[in-house]
Amino acid sequence: MNAFKRCACGAALALSSILLFAGVGAADTVTDDFSSGSIDPNKWFLPPFTQGSAALTQTGGRLEFTASGNVGDGQAQAGLLSKGVGLQTANFFAQARITLDGGNPPFPSLGAGNVVGLALAVDPGATGGDDSYQVALGYVSGFGFALRQETKSNGTVTYTMDSLGNTSPKELFLRIEFDATTKALQALYDAGSGFTAVGSSVDITDWNIDPTETLGIYFFAVAGNASGDPATAAFAVTSGQARIDDFTAEGVAIIPEPALGAPLALLSLALIRATARRVRAARR
């Protein structure tokens, strides 16, 4: 299973962060059960980021990740950035139902040494990739299902990974909470018995960010070699195998859509591409 990490965005994204988020202040709630005919542009920055033979599509009342690749291909990746952002001055949380259903035995078309993973992540918009916080459900061929929480603070990565066995399907609610008093992000999961904390919390005052900077919320999906190297076996994630549903972000601020709609879309796309471009191996 893979960690999903950001790369340097540079001064342009620092400027875009100011342009996108200046004046945002009111807390709100974003919900999406993905039941409409297409991804809602009022809730998400479109189009979704994709790299390689990957797609995030809304179908059958859910958001689906599909991907494929051949020997020698890099990882197939996709991401979707919410228009609801966290403020450092207000409690907020984001959560979604994540399902990996690869049959039994799981994901026979995934190929030896390959991974499929779905992550919920929070990070600042213009830190050069030094800081992020995420929780992910994944399946690694030859290892099984795993729940992973990863923190990147000032460029240093720490993580925990808990095995969830080899029986498919696996369906969890993944959640990230922010406490404005303690300035802490905490990942949680719910397998049907209520939310339980997973991994370690992070105090974002340890991050090298401005106290007025907002915290982006996004999904990230990946399939391919678990090491991040070119695939040594073909892989495929087909329709219905990797799903996201029942998204809620509460206590967030909605990014207003300015008159410069096209530049805003390009800036948000640059942000999520920067978020996705550096993928490291989770199996050390």
Image (tube, rainbow, N blue to C red):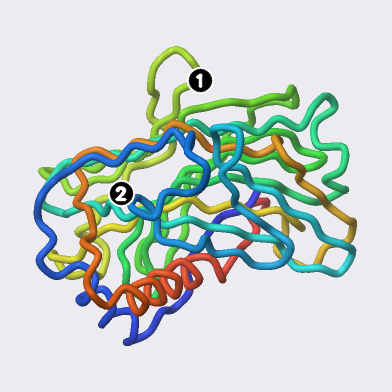
Residue that label 1 marks = 191
Of helix, strand and loop, which one carries label 1? loop
Residue drawn 46% across the image and 66% down it? 272
Answer whether residue 204 is visible to the viewer in this image: yes
State the residue in front, 208 or 218: 218
Q: Is residue 211 above or below residue 247?
A: below
Mark 2 against mark 1, which lies toward the viewer?
Answer: 1
Residue drawn 87% across the image and 62% down it? 70
Residue drawn 82% across the image and 45% down it? 110
Residue drawn 39% across the image and 24% down it? 196
Q: CA distance from mark 2 to mark 1?
A: 23 Å
Answer whether residue 133 is visible to the viewer in this image: no
State the residue in front, 60 or 124: 60
Residue that label 2 marks = 202
Crowding near the residue tagged with mark 2, few <14, some 14–19, many ≥20 C-alpha atoms within 10 Å? many
Quarter residue 242 falls in: top right
